[in-house]
Amino acid sequence: MNAENVHQDIDLAAPDLPREPEDVAGTAAPGDDAETGFDTETGALIEPAESELGIDPAPGFEPAEPDPEPAAPEPAAPPTGTVSAERLAAKALEARLLGGERKLRRREVAAGAGLSLLSARKLWRALGFPNLGDEDVAFTERDQSALSTIVDLVRDGKLTEEAAISITRAIGQMTDRMVVWQIEALVEDMVQEQGVPDAVARKRLVSELPNLIDALEEMLVYSWRRQLNAAVQRLAVRAEAGLQSSEEGREGDEDDSPLPLARAVGFADLVSYTSLSRRMNEKTLAQLVQRFENKCAEIISVGGGRLVKTVGDEVLYIAETPAAGAEISLALCRAFTEDEILPQARVAMVWGRILSRLGDIYGPTVNLAARLTALADPGTVLVDSMTAAALEQDDRFVLVPRPAEDVRGFGEIHPVQLQPGSGRGLILD
């Protein structure tokens, strides 16, 4: 990380920054917008102006402010009855997951990490946590430790504040989706294997989860390390075929493009999904979508690509080279044509430059691949003429020109149908 990009003058020990105005519930008070506005030109959080506070505010994460005297606790209400077994199990599970009992308020956690509440809330919002009031006892010492871990990366000059918040947001969004997916998979399994209703399975899962936590956590860390290593290898070892193909139709060198990554971008779209979904009950539709996603994930992974996202009946994927993208595209098309349950798919793939941000990809290459998908006949794969030129010397593929089409946003393009040539294609175990 270039040290010039790091806030060098963060005064993390300054004790006397003014308190941010807040209401009792912990949501932004009417004056909050002036204090933490959003700069519509730069898309960045704005720190308070000197004229508003009478001092020159420190950039980046703000240091902690003195913690006010906590309000006297209200007398505990007398017990109204025995606690259910389910509630006791949930409470024990919470203590295990959170690292202990909730004993800290938000200002205490922020102060313990050496931050103002404003800066702490930036990170909690990035993680996807809800707003809490000053008197809500909602945090544990593990929350304070995690906050300090993130902030120390900025203090040590390893990350800028903007990068820290972006990375934190990625962790929050990805783990949220992962947990929902895992819970639903476990509930569905219990419904099928134990023959219990959905509501019963969800209650019963609370007592089953303690036996799974360690294994799930171990697999999460293992997978993250493997995925990070794979990303490092993609950075360090650029495929020669990809570098050569990325120069097709361009002038200049690899580093002169505003879109930095040359990738094969593909879409696969199930045919007649909308009409099928209207005729299916909820359970059958869920099984169809799951079968579709599982098959796509397997083929794309075996082909060395990456599944960027699924949106209902459509998947978006990328690969490092035109040939890899073509192999994956043909394999997807063949798999759905041969599947006894799933309908056929329209598939399209374009080799070009993209911008990768927030786990997604952007740029004209992505848009063109989407347009070509709509033009493809069921059970076929289309590429554009530039991608066809990058594949024409490879005898694993047959390229059949199609009539020119006028495509919104691109004008006249010349689609080419991609068909398998010599070789066995992508082989699944």
Image: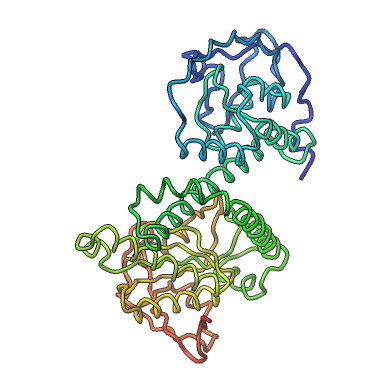
In screen coordinates, is 6 left or right of 179?
right
271, above or below 83, in the image: below
Q: Residue furthest bottom?
A: 422
**Where does residue 374 sit, x and y in percent of width and height?**
32, 66
- Quadrant where the image shows the N terminus: top right
Q: Is 234 placed left or right of 379 in the picture?
A: right
Q: Is 160 located above or below residue 69 in the figure? A: below
| View extreme (left): residue | 279
Residue at 25% across, 67% down: 272
- Kindly indicate the quadrant of the structure image that contains residue 3: top right
Q: Which residue is pictured at 63% across the width and 73% down the height?
A: 244
User: Along the line of sight, which residue is nearer the eye, 88 or 396?
Assistant: 88
In front of the other: 391 or 304: 304
Q: Is residue 124 left or right of residue 12?
A: left
| Residue 273 percent coordinates (x, y) | 27, 64
Closer to the camera in the image, 116 or 101: 101
- Residue 213 drawn above or below residue 426: above
Q: Nearer the viewer, residue 224 or 12?
A: 224
Colour theme? rainbow
Q: Position of residue 131 (x, y in %)?
A: 51, 26
- The residue depicted at 66 percent of the width and 59 percent of the height is 222
